[in-house]
Amino acid sequence: MKLIALDLDGTTLNSKKVITTETIQAIRKAQKQGHIVMALTGRSATPVIAELAKYDLDLHVGGNNGTEIYANGQLIELTSLPLLQCQKIVLELEKEVMPYKICTNISTFAHKDWLDRFEKVVASGLVPSDYYDHKDYKMFTTPPHVYGQPFFNQPEELLNIESSVIKFLILGLDPIQKNRVKALLETIEDTYVTSSSPFNLEVTHVNGHKGNGLKAMARFFNIPIEDTVAIGDEINDIPMFHAAGLSIAMGNAEEEVKKHSDVVTLSNDENGVAYAFEKYILTD
């Protein structure tokens, strides 16, 4: 029995944001053979569970880069950011006037000026032209209210003992600003800064990454870490590549990501997940 962790965007989902019939069949075949399959993604867990339900897929879920782990629909582990860290992160983001969201155990909340800040950076002419054609540009730049994400007026509304802050999701369309902020955030103790596209930053607790998310699920099901498989395509997948017994990069992954994998499969538009299952996991 193996535990298989699947990234979603750019991996399980093709460029049209669809899970193909071939991929669904491969996942179900693996489950029928006794393997455990989980979605391990940068997205929040609740909408991921709803997305998988559209395909009648019953997967365990690791949301927000493995900071919230759900097995059999029950939360088994939550890795949150301490209040002091959150305050330091907010201070830097407000200095830079960046559009950002705060993901908590309750919901994902967007800054009240998110749209204004986004429109200003687009109007500045500092956004590289190739960003507009990127597969995830629409997903990250769609106004929060379209996703049903509530707004907050002041960060202090969320930075309190009543809610656990899991992740900061920052839109960094100006590359120079993004790199500057990334360097600043990395100086804050016990934080982990990663990205799932060229133009975003995701900040979690130092233990809040996909590698630990994979380990948490493996512990829950008592599966040796050498019997785990991780499939992904972006920078935030690298920690789970390092943790897994077998790491598989998608054909559409960046070269830097492929360097950290054991093998490379086909792209997400070539049913790369299904191909990887057939070649490395399933038995006839």
Image (spheres, rainbow, N blue to C red):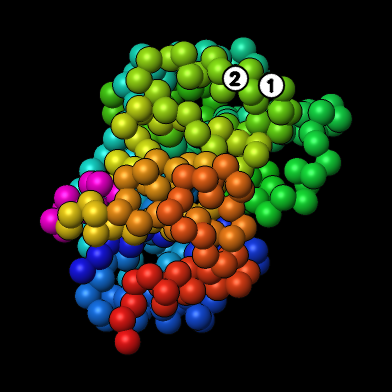
- Choose between 202 and 119: the one closer to the eye: 202
Q: Which residues are magenta?
A: 214-222
Q: Is residue 155 left or right of 213 when viewed as pictured?
A: right
- Residue 122's image quarter? top right
**For residue 247, which numbered disc appears in the image?**
none
Q: CA distance from mark 2 to mark 1?
A: 6 Å
Q: Which residue is mark 1?
A: 177
Q: Residue at x 24, y 59 (%)?
A: 227
- Choose between 111 and 264: the one closer to the eye: 264
Q: Is residue 162 left or right of 144 when viewed as pictured?
A: left
Q: Locate residue 199, reporting x and y percent.
A: 66, 37
Answer yes or no: is residue 17 visible.
no
Answer yes or no: is residue 209 visible.
yes
For the residues bearing labels 2 and 1, Cβ distance under 8 angstroms: yes
Assess whether residue 169 is covered by the magenta stretch: no
Residue farthest along the bottom direction in this orientation: 284
Dot 1: what SS?
helix
Q: Locate residue 41, reporting x and y percent.
A: 44, 51
